[in-house]
Amino acid sequence: MLDSIFASDGASWHAHKNMLRSHTAKSGATNYSVMEKHISQLNRNLENGEPHSCFDQIDRFNLDVAAAFGESARTLTSGKQPLRRAVEKMYLWNTKRVFFGKIGALFPSNPKANGVLHSYLDQVIDKAMATHEETDSD
């Protein structure tokens, strides 16, 4: 995390926030074109004549729509789910950590899940940085 937006304050925090604003402003339920794309894919998945777990499909849909900075996690179109599995493992770890209070901080995290999450976020951050540099040069 070093000097990321999550670990900074003051002027540094404002600089990070301003750099990421264009990416976060477009994410969420108000970006109807993104929602429509994912709803269409969800409908295609459910209409293919095979039995489905509604929880599985809705969980994939939610992760795709809510993924970092509007970047789809592409879980509705992929058979492999490394990001989704990593998020689930970290949810479980964090739940245990919170449940056990102060001693929960001693629980080891999942290095493999951390690696998957860091890899995904590194890609998103690299794209944000490239977009920010392009905007600055204009």
Image (tube, rainbow, N blue to C red):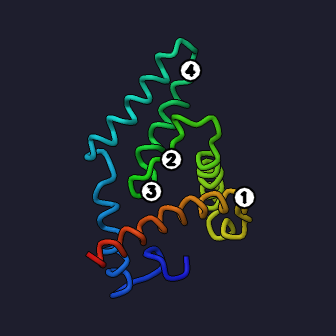
Sequence-wise first label, 4 or 3: 4
Give percent across and percent down for residue 9: 39, 84
Tell me how far mark 1 sits from mark 3, CA to CA: 19 Å
Tell me how far mark 4 sits from mark 3, CA to CA: 26 Å
Residue furthest out toward the front: 138
Q: Is mark 3 on a helix, strand or loop?
A: helix
Is the C-beta separation of discs 1 and 3 under 8 Å?
A: no
Tell me how far mark 1 sits from mark 2, CA to CA: 18 Å
Q: Is mark 1 on a helix, strand or loop?
A: helix
Screen quadrant of the C terminus = bottom left
Q: Is mark 4 on a helix, strand or loop?
A: loop
Amino acid type of the residue tagged 4 in the rendering: His
Q: Is residue 94 left or right of residue 62?
A: right
Res 14 label = none
Tell me how far mark 2 sits from mark 4, CA to CA: 20 Å
Sequence-wise first label, 1 or 2: 2
Amino acid type of the residue tagged 3 in the rendering: Ala
Give percent across and percent down for residue 76: 51, 35
Q: In which quarter of the image is residue 104?
A: bottom right
Q: What element carries label 2?
A: loop
Residue beneath label 1, please?
Answer: 112
Residue beneath label 2, please?
Answer: 73
Residue visible at 55% across and 31% down?
Answer: 56
Residue beneath label 4, please?
Answer: 52
Amino acid type of the residue tagged 1 in the rendering: Lys
Front: mark 1 or 2: 2
Residue visible at 51% across and 37% down?
Answer: 60
Give percent across and percent down for residue 55: 53, 30
Q: In this view, does 48 lie to the left or right of 70?
A: right
